[in-house]
């Protein structure tokens, strides 16, 4: 692949490929030259490349990655739920031992404490990873506070109107 400057004898071919709408990488492949040579030649010839396709492809790729992270975060949350549930399910514990290396097992109503710790730790790791992939939505409570203050303001205004109405002086001839 040629790294040096492009000879003038190749400029017409370069311009033709550019006019066809080929991008920098495609021109480099077609002409057997380095991408940097294509970039320098384009600048020298006053040509630019349409980056809208690249931007659209990048945006699509980023959206695909975000969706994949979201799916993985959901799966990790499911894993954490399954691991946590195992703590309270019947569990078979076993051991090999003795001079004859015999196998012994017993079914317990729930996992032993050490196994619960391990399950909870693993579930916690799954939750942490899922939150890194798809952070929980943070709410500052500002909207709730605004709503509460708005309701309080309306209630105070209604109370004030009711008090004002109760204090209106009686018109002559009316009795209270």
Image (cartoon, rainbow, N blue to C red):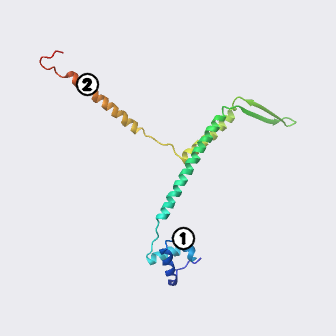
166 versus 94 height, above or below: above
* Residue reaching furthest to the bottom: 9
* Residue reaching furthest to the right: 100
**Res 92 quadrant in image:** top right
Q: Nearer the viewer, residue 158 or 88?
A: 158
Which residue is denoted by mark 1 in the rendering?
Answer: 25
On the picture, is 106 further left or further right than 142?
right
Q: Give residue 65's position: percent from left, percent from top.
A: 55, 54
Q: Nearer the viewer, residue 83 or 60?
A: 60
Q: Give residue 171's position: percent from left, percent from top.
A: 14, 20
14 versus 147 height, above or below: below
Q: Give residue 89's position: percent from left, percent from top.
A: 68, 32
* Contact? badges 1 and 2 (CB < 8 Å): no
SS of the residue under disc 1: helix
**Res 130 quadrant in image:** top right
Q: Residue at x 51, y 43 (%)?
A: 136
Q: Residue at x 34, y 34 (%)?
A: 149
148 versus 130 height, above or below: above
Q: Is residue 33 visible?
A: no
Which residue is denoted by mark 2 in the rendering?
Answer: 162
Which quarter shows the C terminus?
A: top left
Q: What is the distance, in whole Å, between disc 1 and disc 2 at their CAs? A: 77 Å
On the picture, is 91 further left or further right than 60?
right
Q: Earlier in the sequence, mark 1 or mark 2?
A: 1
- Residue 54 circle label: none
Q: Give residue 5's position: percent from left, percent from top.
A: 52, 80
Counting other residues with Cα less than 10 Å from the Cα at mark 1, is it few (<14), some (14-19), or many (20 or more)? some
* Residue reaching furthest to the front: 20
**Res 114 quadrant in image:** top right
Q: Residue at x 65, y 38 (%)?
A: 119
């Amino acid at each position: 692949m040629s790294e040096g400057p492009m000879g003038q004898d190749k400029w017409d071919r370069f311009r033709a490929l550019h006019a066809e709408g080929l991008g920098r990488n495609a021109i480099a492949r077609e002409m057997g030259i380095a991408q940097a040579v294509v970039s320098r030649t384009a600048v020298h010839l006053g040509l630019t490349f349409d980056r809208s396709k690249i931007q659209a492809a990048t945006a699509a790729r980023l959206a695909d990655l975000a969706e994949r992270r979201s799916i993985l975060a959901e799966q990790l949350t499911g894993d954490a739920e399954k691991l946590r549930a195992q703590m309270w399910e019947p569990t078979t514990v076993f051991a090999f031992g003795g001079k004859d290396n015999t196998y012994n097992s017993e079914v317990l109503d729930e996992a032993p404490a050490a196994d619960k710790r391990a399950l909870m730790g693993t579930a916690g790791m799954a939750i942490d990873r899922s939150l890194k992939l798809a952070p929980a939505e943070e709410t500052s409570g500002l909207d709730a506070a605004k709503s509460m203050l708005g309701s309080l303001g309306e209630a105070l205004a209604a109370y004030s109107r009711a008090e004002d109405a109760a204090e209106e002086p009686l018109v002559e001839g009316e009795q209270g």
